[in-house]
Amino acid sequence: MGWMNNLKVAYKLLILVVVAVIGMSFIGWNGYSAVTKSHRDMEVMFEGTVRGIDAVGQARCGTRYAQGMAVIATTVKDNNKRLQELKGKYEDGTKSVDENLAKYDAITYKIEGEDAVVDKVKKDWAALRTNLDESMAMCLEGKNEEALAHYDEVGSPLAASLGKELGELSE
C-alpha cells in the first residue's frame, strides 16, 4: 500500500471518483432493473388476475341475474307487460355474461392449464342459455309450469356446474 502514499492527492481523488462512479452505476442499474421487473410483475398481476377476477365475477352475476329473471317469469300469469319487462332484464343478464366472457378471453396473461376450464364454461353457458331461452319462450306462450319443469330438469344442474367452474376461474 506504499504506492498509495506516493501518489499525489489529485490522483487519489481521481481514484476515489472512479470507484464512486462505478459503485453508483452498479447500484443504479440494480435499482432500475428491480423497478422494471416490479412493473412487469404488476402488469401481469393486474391484467391476469384483477381483470380476470372482475370479468368472472361479472359473468357470474349476469348468469344469476338471467337465471333469476327466467325463473321469476315462470310465476307470472296473464301479465304480458311484466313478462316483457322480465324478458328485457333476462336479455340484459345474458348480454352481461357474453360481454364478460369475451373480456376474459381478451386477457393476455393467463394461468397455465385454465383453457380447459374456460372451454367448459363456454360450453355450459351455451347450454344454459339455450335452456333459459326455451324456458322464457314457454313463459311467453303461457306454459309456465312446463317452463319451470324444463328449467329444473336441465337448467338448474347446468347453472350449478357453471357456478362451480366460474368459481375455479376466480381462484
Image (spheres, rainbow, N blue to C red):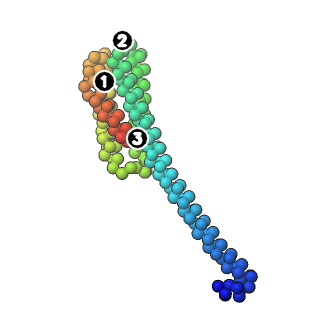
For mark 2, what is the residue? 78
Q: In the displayed structure, does residue 117 sit left or right of residue 37?
A: left
Residue 10 vs 80, above or below: the answer is below
Amino acid carrying label 3: it is Ser
Q: For mark 2, give the secondary structure.
A: loop
Pick the quarter of the image with the C terminus. top left
Q: Which mark is residue 170?
A: 3
Question: What residue is at 39 percent from the left and 29 percent from the top?
Answer: 64
Q: Earlier in the sequence, mark 2 or mark 3?
A: 2
The mark lying in front, picked from 1 and 3, is 3
Q: From mark 2 to mark 1, how far is it between C-alphas?
A: 16 Å
Marks 2/3: CA–CA distance: 41 Å
Q: Residues within 10 Å of mark 2 (few under 14, many from 20)?
A: few
Mark 1 → mark 3, Cα distance in angstroms: 29 Å
Within-10-Å neighbours for mark 1: few <14, some 14–19, many 20+: many
Whichever of labels 1 and 3 marks the residue nearer the N terminus, that label is: 1
Q: Which structural element holds mark 3?
A: loop
Q: Most extreme residue toward the right, as rendered?
A: 9
Write the residue at 30% across / 17% down. Answer: 144
- Find residue 51 and report its horizontal and vertical position in percent: 47, 43
Residue 89 vs 36, above or below: the answer is above
Residue 132 is situated, as x and y percent measured from the top left of the image, at 32, 27
Instruction: Identify whether 14 is placed above or below 46.
Output: below
Residue in the image at 38% along x and 24% along y = 68
Give the residue pinned by disc 1.
135
Which label belongs to residue 84? none
Left or right of residue 57: residue 35: right
Quadrant for residue 60, please give it.
Answer: top left
Pick the residue in front: 171 or 153: 171
